[in-house]
C-alpha cells in the first residue's frame, strides 16, 4: 500500500537522480565506442584482422539478444537499485578485462561481459526514470538521458583529439574508457543511496519493467514486422559502419585519426540536435512510412560516394546524420500506434533483440568482407565490398518502408500516415 501522507520527491531531487543515472549511461556509451578510433592500432600492434575487430564489436551485441528477455525479470526479482549496481559493475569489469590483455580471446570475453551489463543497465535506467518521472516530465527526462548517453559516444570518437597522447599504443585508449566506465558504478551507487533515502522520506512510484511476453508475439500485425525489418537493416547499416569508420577514413581517404573520429561523431552530433526536432515535426505532419522511406533512400548513395569519389566527406556524413536523426525519431514511436499499450514492452523488447542479431551479424560480415578484399591503406579499393553491403541495406530499408506505406494507406492501416497532433485520438 502507498503511504499517501508522505510527500512526493521534489523536483531538485528528481533531477539529481536523472544526473547520476545519466552519468552511468555516459560511461557505458563511451566504453562501447572506444574501439573504433584504435582499430588500425589493434591491427598494427596486435596483428588483429578486420574480422577480429568486427568480432570484438559484434560480441557486445551477442548477449543482448538474450538480456532483453531477462533484464526486466532480474529487476523485478531483486529490485531496481541492486540490479543497477550489478549491471554497473559488469560495465566496469568488462572494459577492465579488455584493457588487461592483448589476446583476442581475453579482449572478447571482456567485451562480452560488458555487453551483458550495458544493455541491461539501459533497461534499468529506463525503469528508474519511469519510476521517478511518470506523470511528471518523463519525455523530457528520457530525451536528456539519451543526450547524455550520446555525449559518451561523441567524447569517445573525438578522444584522438582531446587525448592525443593516448594513441601511440592500444592500451592507454582502453584505460581511458575504463576510467569512464567507472561512472557506471558511481551512478549506480549514488542512485542506491538516493533511493534508500527516498523510500524512507517520500512516496515513490511503482517499479514496472517492459518484459517480453512470448505469447504476445503472435498477435503483432504485418506493419509491426515491416518496422522490425526496417530497424534491422537501418541500424546494421549505421553502427557496423562506425566500427570501421575511423580506420576507413584514414586508410581510404588519408584523413588524420582526429578528423576521422570527428567525421564519425557527426552522426551523434546530428542525432543529439535533430532527433527531437524531427520528432516534433513528424507529430505535426504524420507521413511516417514515407519519411522512413526518405531516410533509407539517403543511405543508399552515401557509402558509394565515399567508396568511389573524393567528394568532401562532410557531405555523405551529413546525409547519413539526417537519416540517423530522422528514422529513429519516426520508427520507435510508430510502434506505439500499431501495437496495443499492454503489449508495448514485448514489442520494443523483441525489436531490440532482433536489432542486436543484425548488429552481431553485420559487424562480423563487414569485417570478413574487408579481410576478403584485403582492405588497407595500400589497397583502399578493398573497402568497396563492405560499402556495397551497406548500400544494399539502405535499398532494403527503402523496400520495407515502401511496403509499410502501402500497408498503412490500405484497409489495414493504423494511421501512421494520417495521425498528427491536430487529429490524434484523445
Image (cartoon, helix red, strand yellow):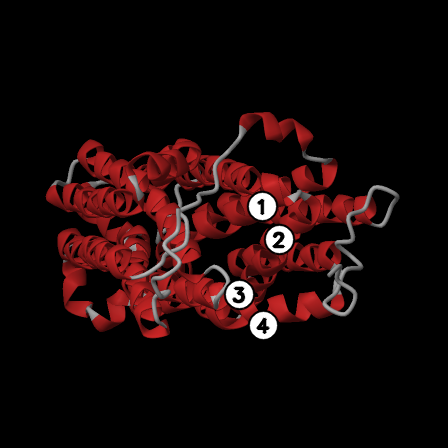
The mark found on residue 40 in the picture is none
Mark 3 crowd level (few <14, some 14–19, many ≥20, 10 Å Cα)? many
Visible residue check, residue 202: yes
Which residue is pictured at 17% across the width and 55% down the height? Answer: 182
Label 2 vs 1, first from the N-terminus: 1
Mark 1 crowd level (few <14, some 14–19, many ≥20, 10 Å Cα)? many
Q: Secondary structure at mark 1?
A: helix
Rounded to the nearest whole Å, what is the CA distance between mark 2 and mark 1? Answer: 8 Å
Rounded to the nearest whole Å, what is the CA distance between mark 4 and mark 2? Answer: 14 Å
Please state the horizontal and vertical placement of residue 63, each as a whole percent of the image.
36, 33
Label 3 vs 4, first from the N-terminus: 4
| Residue 300 horizontal side relative to residue 245, left or right | right
| Residue 419 horizontal side relative to residue 185, left or right | right
Which residue is pictured at 29% across the width and 53% down the height? Answer: 28
- Confirm or deny contact between disc 1 and disc 3 (CB under 8 A): no
Q: Is residue 151 above or below residue 339?
A: below
Q: Secondary structure at mark 3?
A: helix
Mark 3 vs mark 4, foreground winner is 4
Mark 1 vs mark 4, foreground winner is 4
The mark found on residue 321 in the picture is 3
Which residue is pictured at 68% across the width and 66% down the height? Answer: 283
* Of 90 and 48, the residue lying toward us: 90
Label 1 vs 3, first from the N-terminus: 1
Visible residue check, residue 256: no
Please state the horizontal and vertical placement of residue 382, each as a whole percent of the image.
45, 46
Which residue is pictured at 35% across the width and 55% down the height? Answer: 247
The mark found on residue 277 in the picture is 4
Q: Secondary structure at mark 4?
A: helix
Instruction: Tell me which corner region of the image, top left, top right, bottom left or bottom right, holds residue 248.
Output: bottom left
| Residue that numbered label 1 is attached to | 231
| Residue that numbered label 2 is attached to | 331
Mark 2 vs mark 1, foreground winner is 2
Amino acid at each position: 500500500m502507498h503511504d499517501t501522507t508522505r510527500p512526493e520527491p521534489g523536483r531538485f531531487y528528481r533531477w539529481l537522480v536523472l544526473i547520476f543515472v545519466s552519468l552511468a549511461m555516459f560511461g557505458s556509451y563511451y566504453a562501447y565506442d572506444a574501439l573504433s578510433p584504435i582499430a588500425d592500432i589493434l591491427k598494427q600492434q596486435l596483428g588483429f584482422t578486420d574480422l577480429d575487430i568486427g568480432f570484438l564489436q559484434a560480441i557486445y551485441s551477442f548477449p543482448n539478444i538474450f538480456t532483453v528477455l531477462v533484464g526486466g525479470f532480474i529487476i523485478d526479482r531483486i529490485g531496481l537499485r541492486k540490479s543497477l549496481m550489478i549491471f554497473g559493475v559488469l560495465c566496469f569489469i568488462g572494459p577492465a578485462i579488455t584493457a588487461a590483455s592483448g589476446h583476442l580471446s581475453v579482449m572478447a570475453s571482456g567485451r562480452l561481459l560488458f555487453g551483458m551489463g550495458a544493455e541491461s543497465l539501459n533497461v534499468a535506467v529506463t525503469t528508474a526514470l519511469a519510476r521517478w518521472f511518470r506523470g511528471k516530465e518523463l519525455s523530457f527526462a528520457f530525451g536528456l538521458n539519451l543526450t547524455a548517453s550520446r555525449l559518451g559516444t561523441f567524447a569517445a570518437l573525438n578522444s584522438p583529439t582531446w587525448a592525443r597522447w593516448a594513441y601511440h599504443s592500444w592500451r592507454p585508449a582502453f584505460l581511458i574508457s575504463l576510467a569512464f566506465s567507472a561512472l557506471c558504478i558511481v551512478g549506480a551507487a549514488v542512485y542506491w543511496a538516493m533511493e534508500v533515502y527516498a523510500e524512507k522520506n517520500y512516496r515513490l512510484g511503482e517499479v514496472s519493467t517492459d518484459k517480453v511476453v512470448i505469447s504476445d508475439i503472435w498477435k503483432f500485425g504485418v506493419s509491426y514486422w515491416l518496422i522490425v525489418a526496417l530497424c534491422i537493416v537501418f541500424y546494421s547499416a549505421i553502427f557496423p559502419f562506425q566500427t570501421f569508420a575511423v580506420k576507413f577514413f584514414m586508410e581510404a581517404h588519408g584523413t588524420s585519426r582526429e578528423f576521422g573520429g570527428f567525421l564519425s561523431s557527426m552522426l551523434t552530433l546530428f542525432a543529439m540536435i535533430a532527433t527531437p526536432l524531427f520528432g516534433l515535426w513528424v507529430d505535426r505532419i504524420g507521413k511516417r512510412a514515407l519519411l522512413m522511406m526518405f531516410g533509407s533512400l539517403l543511405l543508399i548513395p552515401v557509402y558509394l560516394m565515399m567508396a568511389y569519389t573524393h567528394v568532401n566527406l562532410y557531405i555523405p556524413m551529413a546525409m547519413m546524420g539526417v537519416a540517423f536523426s530522422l528514422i529513429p525519431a519516426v520508427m520507435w514511436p510508430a510502434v506505439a500506434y500499431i501495437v496495443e499499450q499492454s503489449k508495448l514492452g514485448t514489442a520494443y523488447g523483441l525489436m531490440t533483440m532482433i536489432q542486436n542479431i543484425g548488429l552481431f551479424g553485420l559487424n562480423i560480415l563487414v569485417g570478413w568482407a574487408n579481410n576478403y578484399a584485403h582492405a588497407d591503406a595500400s589497397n583502399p579499393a578493398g573497402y568497396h565490398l563492405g560499402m556495397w553491403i551497406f548500400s544494399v541495406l539502405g535499398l532494403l530499408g527503402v523496400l520495407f518502408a515502401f511496403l509499410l506505406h502501402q500497408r498503412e494507406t490500405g484497409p489495414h492501416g493504423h494511421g501512421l500516415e494520417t495521425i498528427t497532433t491536430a487529429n490524434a485520438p484523445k
